[in-house]
Image: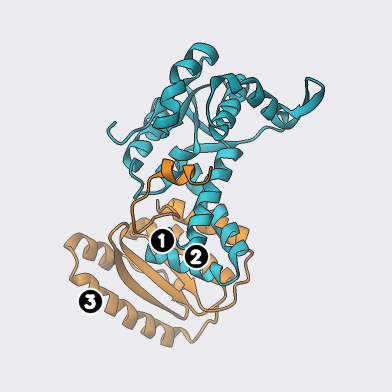
Chain colours: A orange, B cyan
Amino acid sequence: MSKVDLEDTFQMLSKSLSTCLEWASSLPSELTRNFLESSLPMQFIYSMLSIVKTDPDIGVYIEFHVMGCASEAIEFWERLVEEVYPKLKQPIFVYWSGELDVNPVELGLRVGKLLAKMRVSPIILKHPIDAVEELKREW
Amino acid sequence: MVVCYVDSSILISALTPTESRHRESVKTLEDVRRGGGILITSTYAFMEVANVVCRRIMSGQWNLIEPLNRLATTMGKLGYKALCETLTSMLLPTLEQLGVKVIEKQDFYVLEKLNETYAAKIFREAIKLTWINCRTKDLLHIAIASLMMRKHDAKRILTADEEDFSKIKKTLKDNLNIEVEIVSHTK
């Protein structure tokens, strides 16, 4: 992950968070309070963009877009889940724009652990299914 | 303390919030754990789950919610192999979080004499149980549960497959002392 000038990055992050806060202000007060009360530790200040989004199944979640490779993004995500998620209580997702330098098995295990910590299943679908029918289609 | 064998239908149901019995499946698993019980499953059941999940996502028949789909799309760019390896690995920690332990025993694959030939213990057990009269996939789950009953004192099978297991529920209880708990929509 490319570390940029801290001052510039902080300003960019502040701007980004302000946009998020503005958006979050229109949401129920509890969420807004949670969001306002939480602050990202300084060590998380990298070149990134954060966006607050909603999904009908998992509710409000936060996306971080990291300009770095997958290994750095996953490390960053792990720290976010460890240190920020307990305060926010909203699922956090991190995406990367750089190289995918983690093998799929390791990536799956690490992301699976992060999702489990946030109580987000890796197979949340947009539509209903019947497990028994799906299994029977295979036999 | 009851040891329950969780079959693939319950695993998929508990992992997928939009599955029609999801709430009931999660509650059943929680109730067992709350009561001090232990939840186990087999690599066979896990393989069934992994195969269904991967095949449906690869074919586009299952659509993940946006934040998960974005991850899947990233992996999908590397090909189906990378996508499936990632998805399969992602499932394990979630099962752990649900309290379900995937158990495998080398002993299940030891070759044993079967008439004039040899068969892995697991298949020998399944062949011995063909009189139960059920589909092959269910027979394998029953054979595993039967072996696990001896190894881990598993007493109950948790399944959502009402159609197949309701027919053999009494047979399993009377002959193998395996209780079948069927999780249905209306529990």
Q: Are marks 1 and 2 in contact (CB under 8 Å)?
A: yes
Of the pair A10 and B166, the residue shown nearer to us: B166
Q: Which residue is mark 3?
A: A22
**Dot 1: few (<14), some (14–19), or many (≥20) neighbours within 10 Å?**
some
Cα separation, mark 3 vs mark 1, equals 28 Å
The answer to whether residue A113 is visible is yes
Q: Quadrant of the C terminus of chain B?
A: top left
Question: Based on the displayed image, in which of its 4 quarters is residue A27 positioned?
Answer: bottom left
Please report whichever mark, 1 or 2, sits nearer to the chain's N-terminal start: 1
Q: Which residue is mark 1?
A: B64
The numbered dot on residue A92 is none
Q: Which residue is mark 2?
A: B72
Left or right: residue A130 versus residue B73 is left
Numbered disc in front, either 3 or 1: 1
Of residue B157 and residue B169, the one placed in the foreground of this image is B169
Secondary-structure class at tag 3: helix
Q: Amino acid at mark 2?
A: Ala
Q: Chain of mark 3?
A: A
The location of residue B64, given as percent across then percent down, is 41, 61
Which chain does the numbered disc 1 sit on?
B
Q: Chain of mark 2?
A: B
| Residue type highlighted by circle 3 | Glu
Picture quarter containing residue B128? top right
